[in-house]
Amino acid sequence: MAKLQTLKPKLQMLDTRRVPTMQAGSWRTDGMTSAQRGYGYKWQKAREQFLRENPLCVMCEAEGLVVVATVVDHKVPHRGDQKLFWRRSNWQSLCATHHSRDKQREEARR
């Protein structure tokens, strides 16, 4: 009778440490809550409506893909400017991947 062997895993463990996305001195590090920065109930309702009207990720569409958007992104970072924050022409629908990866890289280059 042959003896069974235990196979060693071939996959590397995923590094779960978070990459810091906010730079020191960022307007987001001043101790304000997200609601105080404008992301309260009014924003949640506006976001919900915008995603209903614009349900697909614009970056995926540019790549020829059809992916549901879950994030309303500010094309130009508002950095606390409430007029720019609420300007709908500055909003775009993105999937979580494009918002968390590509958009963050783009902003870090600026």
Image: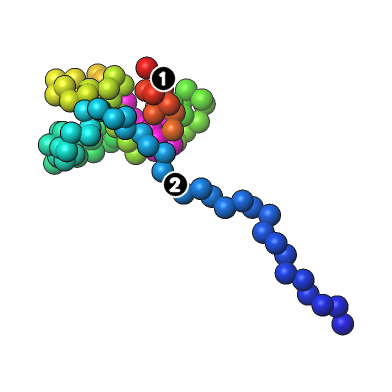
Q: Which mark is residue 109?
A: 1
Q: Is residue 41 shown above or below 9? A: above
What crowding class fits label 2: few (fewer than 14 Cα within 10 Å), some (14-19), or many (20 or more)? few
Where is residue 74, by image quadrant?
top left
Q: What span is colored magenta in the figure?
A: 92-100
In the drawing, does residue 99 fall left or right of residue 10? left
What crowding class fits label 1: few (fewer than 14 Cα within 10 Å), some (14-19), or many (20 or more)? few
Residue found 25% across the figure and 28% down from its top: 26
- Residue 109: x and y, percent? 41, 19
Q: Which mark is residue 17?
A: 2
Residue found 37% across the figure and 23% down from its top: 107
Under mark 1, the amino acid is Arg
In the drawing, does residue 85 fall left or right of residue 107? left
Where is residue 82, by image quadrant?
top left
Where is residue 105, by image quadrant?
top left
In the drawing, does residue 79 fall left or right of residue 55? left
Residue found 37% across the figure and 37% down from its top: 20
